[in-house]
Amino acid sequence: MSLRQLPETDRRPGIPPPHAGHRTRVVLLSVVAGVLLAVLWSFELVDKVIGDNVANTVLGHDAKETAITGTAAGLLFAFVSGFAGTFTACNIAMAASVGPLSQASGTHATAAPLRALLRPVGWLALGMITVSAGYGAIGVLLGDRLPQLSTDVVDGMPVRLIQSSVVFGVIGLALIYLGLATIGLLPDIFAHRPFARVVTMGALVGGFLIGRPYPLFNKLFHWAADTGNPLYGALAFALQSLGNILLVMLIFTAVVIISRGRFLNWMADPRRAAVVTGALLIALGVFTVVYWDVRLPARFGFGWFPTMPYN
């Protein structure tokens, strides 16, 4: 019996495309896309032109230069700076969660598309907040003992960026593994468990904060550490993560609602879902590894990486 003849209940997310050659093309194109993105990426554009201007506009003052005064101001800054950092290199890989979210939403979402979407989004948020809030509390307790808050330099490279390189390298490899597993080239530990895949994606997105060098986040981290209150750290980091995913989730939700669930039903086809999800995970995983473990060290004289004129 062919896959198209199987009853709907027997169709499982993660079933790979039928031809090995097709899977190979998906991987190669995804790798090329990830490397090109790392080469073309302009941190000046996303960090300063977009990020700083968004934060300044929403807060109504210079986000970098104005001191955080009080708990309410700190928590507002956490959410707004997270939103402003949506498209930074330390957060853009969260777009890979769109594929697992679509798979976990299930079939027949046309009747109630929003309800079909809420559950997987909730699981994504659970995985994300568990990691980000936990790190916020630990970060406050450890304070300056964390490399992320250090001003030390090793062989010309700030130790906080060394932490970024290690953390994002691990996260990038995890994304690549999930992508290769999704299209059937590696064992898929989440086969038939789409919600576990979504929770794991959420945990990886929450883990972005462990390596994030984004200046506005660095300012938030120092404020949280100065309060000495782990609860503030947990809440601030949770809000930072929620701000990070807000725009992408709103766009994704709008697409689902406007299409009246047809997008989710389109993604319910296991072969199509495997290609889309696998390609996103591999491309953004490759970007994360190349950007943080090849391009970043090259800026400090460790290896070589092509530099665009605008960088």
Image (cartoon, helix red, strand yellow):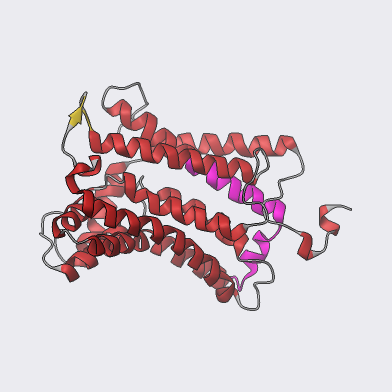
Image coordinates of residue 85 in percent, x first then y, are 31, 54
**Left or right for 276, reference 131:** right
Image coordinates of residue 146 in percent, x first then y, are 23, 43
Q: Residue at x 51, y 53 (%)?
A: 200
Q: Residue at x 66, y 44 (%)?
A: 183
The image quadrant of residue 39 is: top left
Image coordinates of residue 205 in percent, x first then y, are 42, 53
Work out whether 108 lies above or below 182.
below
Q: Residue at x 82, y 63 (%)?
A: 7
Pick the residue in front: 163 or 182.
163
SS assignment for the magenta stretch, majority: helix
Image coordinates of residue 208 in percent, x first then y, are 37, 49
Work out whether 35 lies above or below 44.
above
Residue that lies at the very extreme toward the right in this rendered image: 1
**Left or right for 152, reference 18:** left
Residue that lies at the very extreme toward the bottom in this rendered image: 111
**Range of magenta residues:** 259-285
* Residue 266 lies within the magenta run: yes
Pick the residue in front: 294 or 159.
159
